[in-house]
Image (cartoon, rainbow, N blue to C red):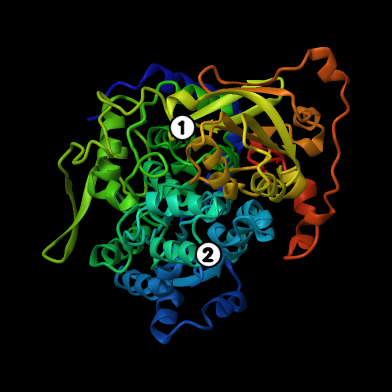
Amino acid sequence: MAATLHPTVEAVTERIQRRSAPVRSRYLDQLRRMGERAPRRHKLGCANIAHALAACGPADKAELEGQGALSIGIVTAYNDMLSAHQPYEHYPELIRQAVREAGGVAQVAGGTPAMCDGVTQGFAGMELSLFSRDTIALSTAIALSHDTFDGALALGICDKIVPGLLMGSLAFGHLPVIFVPAGPMTTGASNVEKSEVRQLYAEGKVGRRELLASEMKSYHGPGTCTFYGTANSNQMMMEVMGLHLPGAAFVNPGTKLRDALTRAAARRITEITSLGNDWTPIGEVVDERAIVNGVVGLHATGGSTNHTIHLVAIARAAGIQLTWEDMAELSEVTPLLARVYPNGLADVNQFHAAGGMAVLIRELLGAGLLHADVKTVAGEGGLARYALEPRLVDGRLAWAEGDGQPLDRSIIRTVAEPFAAKGGLVLLTGNLGRAVSKVSAVKPERRIVEAPARVFHDQAEVQAAFKAGELDRDVVVVVRFQGPKANGMPELHKLTPPLGILQDRGFQVALVTDGRMSGASGKIPAGIHLTPEAVDGGPIAKIRDGDMIRLDTVAGTLEVLVDAAELAARAPAGADLSCYQSGIGRDLFAPFRAAVGPADQGAAVVGGPFGMAA
């Protein structure tokens, strides 16, 4: 199945390995020192052990008092407000039973926050969203800091939760860790219908009652939202990076297959600790090849732009230095093989039914675009194991060959007949700095925009200008002071409906910002994550109303068309940011705003290992 590795994939991987070698080698040295061949709790004092076992039942205590029983930690991001995480309520008991059957004991080691960007979108809470990733990383580290566990299961799905869990787990790189998903909610109202009603509401053609009814039909039950945003991009990445069991990503919650996969993950973690013959520490699973595989998967599916930040931060947590240039070079050779909303009409359930991850991985392996010879939590066989599909055969879980070809070519294509020759993400450079753009959902005729700037310092100002009719023209909307240092880099997804209306009216429209857009954002050409940000005096702070801006995702450029001498002479604009600094918990995150790094370095507060600064 696997072909000779594509020369560009090989060259980029080797470049990352060379660049990362000093820090990565120190990371791996520490990992191996920590990988002891004895249950970790045995080095603790008797009082320490008694505290760890105090709440266990008699049978579990007896097991852990012995010399050989395994102790597995569960780090859970459960809450029942976030639909994707609600199914996790019952996972701990399911896991405990499966681990007992395998001769071990599982305990909930700790919980992490899990906020819903869908709830906070457009409101103050969204300013804590990106910072929640690093908070989750810290929470994961605290959960595992008891140092009594021989392996861990990470229960998380959504936008910042999976990256945070992974970053925290990589600080314990000697432990095997398996990520356990819960799957997408069943299909409700189509994503296209939902988008249309939102746009009608923005135009004042339907009221709040109609809008709420549409949203409730779309988001209607437990499970992940069904569009292909950051949460479902997470699931794709965990699979292509070998951190899920094969085929686990998009099985619906509450099904027999879903429960079987969860029990299998619990059994598997007991097989890959340092006490056995198949030690699979997460710090060795997440190597340079796995990071490259994650990037390729992101490009091939038109995944979330948020991962141009998260993947950089995840890599750093493993002592690996990934750059936007690496990602851009891989995009040039990775074909777009999936059309899932907002890149198409299908949702993730339809993607899964059409062949899903098994077909995607098979195609990319066959073209030499993925590293096949990687270590995964599934064991021998490398990434080829992930081209198999999980099934229940006489009530027992098994993996088997699927059809091998896409069952619906409007959703998944082969490498020989892709939707596009290049991936869905583009690096933009020019006199405004560096930015990224998601083009997989942008029509080809919309991918170059040259128009006058209209500058705003807050997304609410954009909404007001739209309602006043001030944007009914060709325009590049510039929203600045939205970077990580300014206000935590909130998503500006609520700008999608008004900008979409302007585009539908026939205007050339684009967005330029040092903030983020949702992974669900689609048809508007945008240069986002612009670095350096305005609060650092970046060139975006020098743009004035009426300046001509050229955003060219074909050439990969973002320019303000102002004479270089004039631009250099302009003083950067300032802004009163006090409105972002208090209320809704924002006061507590002042140290994060002060310490956070730039977007192209992962917008991280917590640094990488061995002085690899954020």
Quadrant where the C terminus lies? top right
What residue is shown with label 2?
Answer: 208
N-term mark: 2 or 1: 2
Label 2 sits on a secondary structure element that is helix
Residue at (75, 57) in percent of width and height: 589
| Residue 11 in sight | yes
Q: Is residue 593 left or right of residue 83?
A: right
Label 1 sits on a secondary structure element that is loop
Q: Position of residue 218 (x, y in %)?
A: 40, 60
Front position in the image: 201 or 36: 201
Residue farthest toward the left in the current orientation of the protein: 394
Relative vertical location of residue 560 with respect to residue 376 in this rendering, above or below:
above
Q: Which one is closest to the eye, mark 2 or mark 1?
A: 2
Residue at (36, 62) in percent of width and height: 185
Residue at (39, 58) in percent of width and height: 181
Relative vertical location of residue 327 with respect to residue 605 in this rendering, above or below:
above
Amino acid type, residue under disc 2 in the picture: Arg
How crowded pointer 2 is (Cα within 10 Å; few <14, some 14-19, many 20+) is rated as few
Residue 442 is marked as 1
Amino acid type, residue under disc 1 in the picture: Val
Q: Position of residue 44 (x, y in %)?
A: 59, 69
Front position in the image: 198 or 560: 198
Q: Position of residue 499 (x, y in %)?
A: 57, 40
